[in-house]
Amino acid sequence: MTSPPPGPMAFWQSVGLRFLPFADAASTDLPLGRLLRLALFQVSVGIAVVLLNGTLNRVLIVELGTPSWIVALMIAVPLTIAPFRALIGHRSDIHRSMLGWRRVPYIWFGTLAQFGGLAIMPFALILLTRPDTFALGIAGACASFLLTGAGMHVTQTAGLALATDLAPADSRPRVVALLYLMLLVGMVLASFAIGGLLRDFSATRLVQLIQGAAVLTMVLNMAALWKQEARRPRAVVDALPRPAFATLWASYVAQPGARRLLIAIGVGTMAFAMQDALLEPFGGDVLGLSVGSTTALTGTWALGAILAFAYAGQRLANGADPLRLAGLGLVVGIAAFLLAIFAVPVGAAGLLFAAAAIIGLGSGLFAMGTMIAAMGLASGAAAGLALGAWGAVQASCAGLGIALGGVLRDTIDGAAMAGALGPVLASRATGYGAVYLLEIMLLLAALVVLGPMVGRHAPATGPGQAAPGRFGLSEFPT
C-alpha cells in the first residue's frame, strides 16, 4: 500500500529548509516562529544602524554642511561602548536577579537607552541648523548617538546570548547566524523605507521619521522579549557560580589561535568599516545622487550581506572551514573597493550600487566566518563572553575605522582641492579614493594574519567528510 502524497504544509516546510538560509536552526525547544519573534530585536538594531551610519551622515554632511570628520567621530562615539561587550556578555552570563532572569534586564535597559537616544536626536539636529547653537547641537548629537549606540550594543550582546541559551548546543551557531541575517533584513527594509519617505526631503519629515523609529524600537523589542526567558527559582539563582571575568577572559585568549583570530577580526573589520560613513556622501558628493538614492545604497549593501549569509550557511552545513569563508570575504572586498574607485571616471551610479552589494557580500562572509570561529573557542556556559569578545573587537575596530576614514577623507580632500596634490587630483573624489585604497591594503593585511590559521581550527566535518588539510595564505581563493 502506497503512502499518501505529502500535504501542502509539508511541501512548504521542505521549501523553507532547502532555500531559506538557516531555516534548520529551529528545533523542538525553539520553534521557528518563536525564534523569528526573538529576532525582532535585531530588526530594531538594523533600523538604528541605517539611521546612524546611513541617512544621518548623508544629511549632516551634504544637506547641513557639517564637516565629515565631525560626523565620522559622532558615528564612532557609540562604539566607545564596544570594548565592554565582552564584559556585558559575561555579566549577563552570571547575572543574579530577584525576578530569576539573566538576559532580560540587560535587553530591557538596552532598549530604553536606544529609545532615549533616538528620542532626543531630532532636537540635537535642530540645534545643528543654527550657527549660534551649533556647538550645543554637536554635544546633543554626540549624546544621542552615544545613548543609541550603547543601547544597541547591550541589547544585541544579551539578545544573542539569550538565543544561545534557548537553542540546543548543536544548532547554536545557526541560530546566531539567523539572528544576524535578521539584522541585515532589518537594514534592508529600513533603508528602502527611509529612502522612500525621504524622497522629498524636509527637516520636518526627518524629525518625524526618527521619532517613529524610536517608538518602533520599543514595540519590536517588547514583542521580542515576551515570554522568551524562563524565570528560575531563587535557590537556583543563588547557587550559580560567578567566576571572575579576568579568569575567563585569560582562559579564552590562551587557546591556540585565539589572539591571532581577534587580530584578524580587528584588521578586517576596520578595512570594511572605513567606508561606512563615506559611501552615501560619496554617492551624493561625487555622483550627484539624491538622499533617497544614497539611502538605497545601504539597502543594497545589506542585500549583498544577506546573499553572503545564505552562501555561508550552505557551505557551513557541508562542513566548510569558517575561516576559509572569511578569507574569501576579504578577497571579494578587495574587488569591491576597486569597483567603487572605477565608478568615478566612468561616472556610472550603477557601478557604485554594484560595489555596495559586493562590499556587503565580502563583509558578510568575513563576519559570518569569524563569528562562527570565535564561538567555537568557547563553551556554551560562556556564550555571552564569546559573542561579546567577537562583538567587542569588531565594533571597536569598526568605530576606529569609521573615524579614521572621515579624518583621512577630509584631510586629503582639503589638500587636493587646494591644489597641493596637483591639478589631476584636484577633485572631490580624491579623498574618497584614497580611503578606498587604504581599505584594500588593510584587507591584504588581514589575509596575511588570517592565512596561517585556516584549516588548523576547522569545525567538525560532516558525515563521511575528511578533515581539511593545511591551508595557508598562498591557497586563498583569488
Image (cartoon, helix red, strand yellow):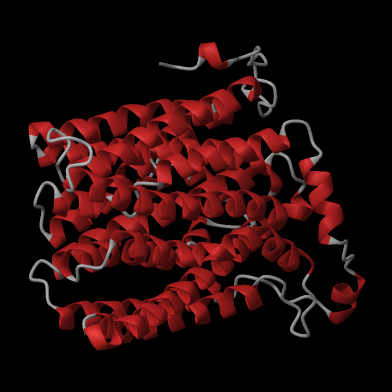
- In this view, the residue in front, 445 or 29, is 445
Image coordinates of residue 67 in percent, x first then y, are 28, 63
Vertical placement of 47 versus 400: above or below?
below
- Please name the residue shown 43% across and 65% down the image: 45
Residue 110 in sight in this render: yes
Image coordinates of residue 283 in percent, x first then y, are 17, 49
Q: In this rendering, would 262 be left or right of 317?
A: right
- Image quadrant assignment for residue 188: bottom left
Label tally = 0
- In this view, the residue in front, 236 or 453, is 453
Image coordinates of residue 141 in percent, x first then y, are 38, 77
Q: Quadrant of the C terminus?
A: top left
Residue 4 in sight in this render: no
Q: In this rendering, would 155 be left or right of 93?
A: left
- Image quadrant assignment for residue 2: top left
- Please name the residue shown 25% across and 37% down the image: 355
- Please name the residue shown 26% across and 38% down the image: 433
- Image quadrant assignment for residue 232: bottom right
Image coordinates of residue 30 in percent, x first then y, are 59, 57
- In this view, the residue in front, 416 or 98, is 416
Vertical placement of 142 versus 325: above or below?
below
- Please name the residue shown 21% across and 43% down the image: 416
Q: In this rendering, would 144 be left or right of 162?
A: left
